[in-house]
Amino acid sequence: MLKQRILSAIVMIAIVCAALFLFSPFYFTLALGVIVTAGVWEWTQFPRLKIVWRFVATSISLAVLFVWIFSQANYLNAGRVFADYAEPLLLVSVIWWFVALGLVVTYPKSAKIWGNSLILHIIFACVTLVPFLIAVAVLRLENYNMDSLHGIQLLLYVFILVWAADSGAYFAGRKFGKHKLAPKVSPGKTWQGVIGGLITSAVLSELFIYCVGDNFFFHGNTLSLTVLSIATVAVSVLGDLTESMFKRQSGIKDSSNLIPGHGGILDRIDSLTAATPFFAYFYFFWL
């Protein structure tokens, strides 16, 4: 099992690096569309759709996404990312994660509202996955025409921030974890683990800003960027808990077996679907 996880991780890292460094903005966004489509396929398990309707829903999503991305091809290659509606859709994502917090905190009572509602599951999937695609593209293409690598560094900063905080939370939870964070949703998570993750993110953020300097970021200052980084990690925990809630309600352990040893696409990006749009919205439109 460990060997399988390591091999899968190596393959995933290679694919991510290829997409980041070798793909044009258009093809990078198309690759994101493939990931989002796989996420849609996995999401269709949550409302317990029959296999034929899962294929129908995923096919429709694929067609809509790719028509949308193809229509924006020239803008994307010019470094412009969905300029007319990036801000409102990222704001919708921020609002959604506040709603998701309420659903998680009140689970399983909240499941009486959304558990068997196909319409709500469709809405939840849209406000989770579409802003994620936009946020990743916006971060990747920041200042693209002046420095094609700048956005890669910014995007990796957000990803590594979340991944490092997740590791910090894991070790802090194992060492000090006593008080359950959300026992009805994810019994393994503790408040001590979350605090460990937040401390890790604060330290990493300060180190990164110190090493690269304030000039790397086109928005904000050291204090505001550190606060945003810590808040982003806090929201990433909510992304993890929300997917766990949906899986628990559907009676499944992993979203799929698409990634051997790691589960599914949603299992790998659940934290990022919350963290990336949150960071992008406040970084670009508030700082």
Image (cartoon, helix red, strand yellow):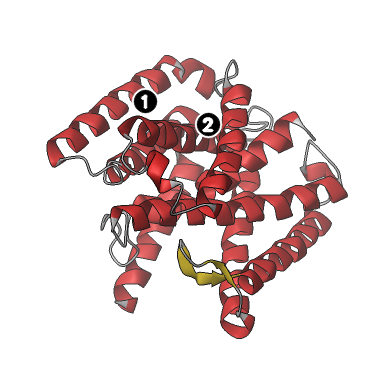
Where is 44 relative to 171, above or below? above
In this view of the protein, which residue sits in the foreground, 146 or 207? 207
On the image, the x and y values in percent for residue 94 come to: 61, 36
Quadrant housing the N terminus: bottom left
Q: Are marks 1 and 2 in contact (CB under 8 Å)?
A: no
- Residue positioned 61% across, 84% down in the render: 175
Provide residue 192's location: percent of width, then percent of height: 65, 73
Q: Which element carries disc 2, helix, strand or loop?
A: helix
Q: Quadrant of residue 64?
A: top left
Residue 167, x across and y down, in percent: 57, 70
Q: Is residue 222 left or right of residue 158?
A: right
Which circle's residue, 1 or 2, is located before the other in the chain?
Answer: 1
The residue at which mark 2 appears reads as 134
| Residue type, numbered disc 2 | Ile
Residue 109 left/right relative to 262: right
Sort mark 2 into few (<14), some (14-19) or many (20+) by Cα contacts within 10 Å: many
Q: Within 10 angstroms of label 1, few (less than 14), some, or many (20 or more) residues?
A: some
Observer-nearest of 226 and 111: 111
* Disc number placed over residue 65 in the picture, else none: 1
Residue 49 image label: none
Instruction: Answer whether residue 149 is visible to the viewer in this image.
Output: no
Between marks 1 and 2, how big is the CA–CA gap? 11 Å
Residue 33 in view in this figure? yes
Q: Nearer the viewer, residue 130 or 54?
A: 54
Q: Is residue 251 left or right of residue 138?
A: left
